[in-house]
Amino acid sequence: MNESITLNYDVDSSDFTRAGEASSNVKRTLKLMDVDPEIVRRVAISLYEGEINMVIHSYGGEIKVIITPDEIEMVLRDKGPGIEDTELAMKAGYSTAPDNIRSLGFGAGMGLPNMKRYSDDLKIESKVGVGTTVRMKVYIS
Amino acid sequence: MTIKDVRDALRARYICGEELEGREVHSACGSDMMSDVLAFVKDRAVLLTGLCNPQVIRTAEMMDIVCIVFVRGKMPDDIMIEMAKEREIVLLSSGHRMFSACGLLYEKGLRGGAPYR
Ligand SMILES: Nc1ncnc2c1ncn2[C@@H]1O[C@H](COP(=O)(O)OP(=O)(O)OP(=O)(O)O)[C@@H](O)[C@H]1O
Ligand SMILES: [Mg+2]
């Protein structure tokens, strides 16, 4: 594989049942490309956590995944409400998820720590009232 | 041990994937919070959970989990079963509560991962 591939997905914030379809699709694509299973798993988990966050915490947005021979870059951009204190949001256990989300199995405050742990590079830019962009990279070699 | 050994230990019943019961399992993880599960990466794991929605199947998919045991007799719906079949994930339902189900598998020699850091 020498060329690079870009995948684009829309993420709808109101559809919890379908949440994770983008991550599922990316995982399948990487498997078909014969990417190392450990790398595929790290990408899948990081992206899935990010996608779930977009569904649960944001008004929706889009995901772009760029696959090159050297790395997999994931860009998750949403339309708000934004994160006031990104450093606080990164803390293990910190969550603003309401009880109804907790009863769905999310809201442990572990998503962002997991994304940091499984990706090689994580950057969050957020502006309250505007939106959040999460960029993650997983290196292939 | 194999998926069949897990089923026998828990006296669980197959919801789908019985034909895959010979597959090996190497570790286990029990939780109702999916990000807790996602913090745990181990090869060929079994997931025990009392949570019953499509995101349980998705979480298992992302982690290459081979088998999900629904505790407390929880039963997934048709959408979840279809998703699991497509992904070759075995689904089991056990009447045991979480603590007992985990204990029974631990007793048989199945272990979790390292402590969370
Ligand atoms: N895209 C987003 N838009 C707005 N707020 C966000 C977004 N992503 C995360 N947050 C905020 O950061 C907090 C921590 O996120 P994190 O993913 O670590 O935990 P969680 O989603 O609450 O729970 P878990 O991921 O364990 O299910 C969230 O509770 C929320 O307040
Ligand atoms: Mg989260």
Image (cartoon, coloured by chain):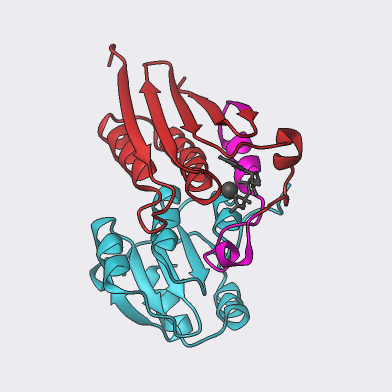
Chain colours: A red, B cyan
Q: In this view, does B86 lie above or below A27?
A: below
How far from the left and from the top, in percent, is residue A37? 40, 37
In this rendering, position of residue A68 left or right of residue A73: left
How far from the left and from the top, in percent, is residue B25? 44, 62
Q: Which of A19 and A84 is in front in this view?
A: A84
Which region of the structure is painted magenta? Answer: A97-125
Residue B5: in magenta span: no
Q: Residue at x 26, y 72 (%)?
A: B78
Q: Which residue lies furthest to the top in this view?
A: A2
How far from the left and from the top, in percent, is residue B7? 40, 78
Image quadrant occupied by the N terminus of chain A:
top left
Q: Nearer the viewer, residue A88 or B31?
A: A88
In this rendering, position of residue A12 left or right of residue A101: left
How far from the left and from the top, in percent, is residue A8? 33, 29
Residue A106: in magenta span: yes
Q: Nearer the viewer, residue A51 or B85?
A: A51
Q: Nearer the viewer, residue A41 or A96?
A: A96
